[in-house]
Image: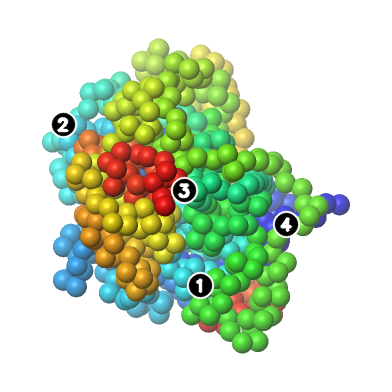
């Protein structure tokens, strides 16, 4: 996993609540057995005017001019602004892979769905929860100011804005540490292998039927 | 000191260790695997040179991509075929039990787990699928995970988690005729919203839940994720035990007796304190129909499509406007005047035998309405299909004009060939009415099985209570 320390870049506003993972990456692209290559199909049904299928040359497909992320001013954005309940629905980690593949390292929203939120951390993407009025102010500034860029400093737990000072955010210490160091948490858990085996022995004793069949 | 909730008990019984900040290592008893979210996890395991920790905890099945028409010739779509073959190959390589596509026990992962007794009370159950919350109906702690966590469980049999809050949703009262578990859970989501359960695990309690069959409880827990909760669960009672007795993967003999004794403690203590409680009077409930593109956008059959202008919150108002434009509906339209042109009876929410019986009860002797272009029944598993055929339900459906299909996820998410075309309007027993969920441009109305069947024969939504004998 790529380390996350400081990210500076353009913010892009996706102004709708309940953006679900079906919208982030539609189902036909989940047939891939790889983790990469999802970027061109991020928000596929909103982004293009035609129906997308795996294997198409996305560079020749007609873009939807009304979709905000297609505006040239947001090209290269690395920070996505979202609304309530961002990432709801399916557990598909492909949603995070698609955001990352497209270049997004940070999503800022008033609230996230649980599984999406967790999936972000596994891939070096930082989901930042901020109060709704703070998010609203960032939306307003982003739309009003072409080239509006932010700096997200994970170590300091701050978002530095050009016009609103620095905004503090919370993050769980364990998740922060994993992101800063780019840690593979399977490796961390396997350091606890003896504790897991000891638990398993006690658990088998208490509930042997869990280990009886299958 | 107050007593423990069911969630507390399940959490404590699986706690391997906990750090000072509450980050915990939780042991996983059952790992269900399907073809869509597992290939990258197996690949990660292979690249790191790791082995599955406990292969006997894993049960695998292809369900999302499989065709629901004759499948003896294999899968026509080469991309889908590769994904299903990849699951077959991974299971063979690691010695994992798989109900492959042509196995009579194959079906939707959340239908076959309980059906086999592979889901048991007191278990932690995970799967790379958000509807894993279904299994909480058995007094289990069950939730969906992403692919990185699928790999984590494969490699370590554990997950790194933080405990959620506890939300009790108490549902009281006898359900009116034509009202089912699906209507209960849609009404709950309408009440608390799709983010209402975020940060919580829900325990469903109350007389209504106690009166539901296991199938009904699974329907309710299935959609806990649609309320944003990590998990949904129901306490163990006699209904739970009776359902599990004799199932292939359930314990037998002396172990069964011992297990039943242990399971009897799987309920919240009388003095347990929940972080939040919501109460719903189910006796007043009418059948529910969603009108928008989020499960919280729901009304009862006697209601009308709401007016965004009545919504005070601007973000919500814009969301409603966008939903009505997508759904091609006007504010004030009576729900009962909406005319679907497709009907889908299936999915991990509503494709169990009881669901098919309920749907069949509404169509006896009647025909699918001329305005319906396609009406599908997709049983949740091969065994559900066999049972339904033994009861003659399939002939009721096919005589009425429904197509009787092979088991799988099918048009719930349209990863296989079963999908809506742009502008199609579907009465669906599935769980998500998101834009494009059942096919790009398709419009989904979530309903119960009996409401879907009534819509099929009437050509418009109607109160199931008035259509049943």
**Distance Cα–Cα, label 2 vs label 1:** 48 Å
Say which of B312 and B16 sits in front.
B312
Chain bearing tag 2 is A
Mark 3 nearby-residue class (10 Å; few <14, some 14–19, many ≥20) = many
Earlier along the polypeptide chain: callout 4 or callout 1?
A: 1
On the picture, is B99 further left or further right than B261? left
CA–CA distance between discs 4 and 3? 30 Å
Q: Position of residue B426 (x, y in %)?
A: 29, 42
Closer to us: A201 or B353: B353
Label 1 resides on the chain identified as: B
Instruction: Judge whether B46 appears above or below B447 on screen.
Output: below
Tell me the residue at 60%/57% (across/down).
B211
Q: Which residue, given by chain and number where applicable, does mark 4 sit on?
A: B268
* Disc number lying in front (2 or 3): 3
Q: Chain of mark 4?
A: B
Q: Is residue A36 above or below residue B65?
A: above
State which chain disc 3 sits on.
B
How far apart are the alpha carbons under marks 1 and 3? 31 Å
Front label number (4 vs 3):
3
B288 above or below B206?
Answer: above
- Which image quadrant is residue A74 in? top left
**Helix, strand or loop for disc 4:** loop
Q: CA distance from mark 2 to mark 3?
A: 47 Å
């Amino acid at each position: 996993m790529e380390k996350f320390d400081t990210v500076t870049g353009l913010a892009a506003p996706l102004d709708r609540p309940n953006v679900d993972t079906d919208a982030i990456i539609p189902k036909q692209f989940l047939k891939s057995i790889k983790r990469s290559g999802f970027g061109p199909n991020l928000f596929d049904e909103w982004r293009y005017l035609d129906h997308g299928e795996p294997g198409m040359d996305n560079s020749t497909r007609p873009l939807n001019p009304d979709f905000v992320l297609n505006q040239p001013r947001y090209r290269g954005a690395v920070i996505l602004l979202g609304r309530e309940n961002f990432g709801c629905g399916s557990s598909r980690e492909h949603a995070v892979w698609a955001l990352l593949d497209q270049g997004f390292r940070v999503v800022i929203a008033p609230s996230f769905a649980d599984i999406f939120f967790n999936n972000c951390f596994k891939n070096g993407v930082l989901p930042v929860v901020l109060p709704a009025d703070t998010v609203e102010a960032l939306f307003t500034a982003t739309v009003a100011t072409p080239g509006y860029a932010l700096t997200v400093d994970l170590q300091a737990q701050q978002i530095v804005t050009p016009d609103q000072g620095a905004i503090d955010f919370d993050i769980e210490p364990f998740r922060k540490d994993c992101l800063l160091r780019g840690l593979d948490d399977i490796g961390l858990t396997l350091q606890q292998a003896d504790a897991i085996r000891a638990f398993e022995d006690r658990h088998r004793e208490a509930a042997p039927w869990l280990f009886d069949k299958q | 000191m107050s007593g423990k909730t069911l969630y507390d008990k399940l959490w404590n019984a699986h706690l391997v260790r906990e750090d000072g900040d509450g980050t915990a290592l939780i042991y996983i008893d059952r790992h269900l695997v399907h073809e869509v979210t597992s290939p990258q996890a197996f690949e990660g395991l292979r690249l790191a040179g790791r082995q599955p920790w406990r292969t006997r905890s894993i049960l695998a099945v292809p369900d999302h991509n499989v065709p629901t028409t004759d499948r003896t010739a294999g899968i026509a779509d080469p991309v889908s075929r590769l994904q299903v073959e990849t699951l077959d190959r991974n299971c063979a390589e690691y010695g994992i039990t798989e109900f492959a596509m042509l196995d009579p026990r194959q079906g939707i992962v959340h239908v076959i787990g309980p059906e086999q007794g592979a889901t048991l009370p007191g278990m932690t159950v995970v799967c790379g699928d958000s509807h894993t919350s279904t299994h909480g109906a058995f007094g289990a702690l069950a939730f969906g995970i992403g692919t990185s966590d699928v790999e984590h469980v494969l490699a370590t049999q554990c997950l790194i988690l933080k405990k959620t809050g506890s939300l009790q949703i108490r549902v009281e009262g006898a359900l009116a005729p034509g009202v089912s578990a699906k209507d209960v859970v849609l009404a709950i989501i309408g009440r608390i919203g799709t983010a209402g359960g975020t940060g919580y695990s829900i325990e469903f309690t109350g007389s209504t839940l106690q009166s539901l069959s296991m199938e009904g409880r699974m329907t309710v827990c299935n959609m806990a994720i649609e309320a944003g909760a990590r998990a949904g669960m129901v306490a163990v009672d006699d209904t739970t035990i009776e359902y599990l007795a004799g199932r292939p993967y359930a314990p037998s003999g002396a172990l069964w007796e011992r297990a039943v004794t242990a399971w009897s403690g799987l309920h919240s203590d009388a003095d347990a304190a929940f972080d939040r409680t919501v109460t719903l009077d189910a006796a007043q409930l009418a059948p529910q129909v969603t009108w928008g593109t989020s499960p919280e956008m729901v009304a009862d059959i006697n209601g009308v499509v709401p007016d965004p202008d009545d919504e005070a919150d601007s973000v919500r108002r814009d969301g409603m406007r966008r939903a009505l434009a997508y759904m091609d509906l006007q504010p004030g339209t009576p729900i009962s005047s909406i005319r679907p042109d497709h009907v889908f009876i299936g999915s991990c929410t509503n494709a169990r035998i009881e669901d098919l019986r309920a749907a069949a009860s509404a169509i006896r002797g009647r025909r699918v309405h001329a305005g319906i272009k396609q009406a599908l029944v997709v049983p949740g598993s091969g065994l559900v299909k066999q049972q339904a055929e033994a009861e003659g339900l399939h002939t009721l459906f096919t005589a009425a004009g429904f197509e009787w299909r092979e088991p799988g996820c099918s048009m719930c998410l349209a990863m296989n060939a079963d999908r809506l075309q742009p502008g199609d309007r579907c009465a669906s027993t599935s769980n998500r009415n998101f834009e494009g969920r059942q096919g790009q441009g398709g419009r989904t109305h979530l309903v119960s099985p009996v409401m879907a069947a009534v819509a099929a024969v009437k050509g418009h939504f109607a109160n199931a209570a008035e259509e049943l004998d």
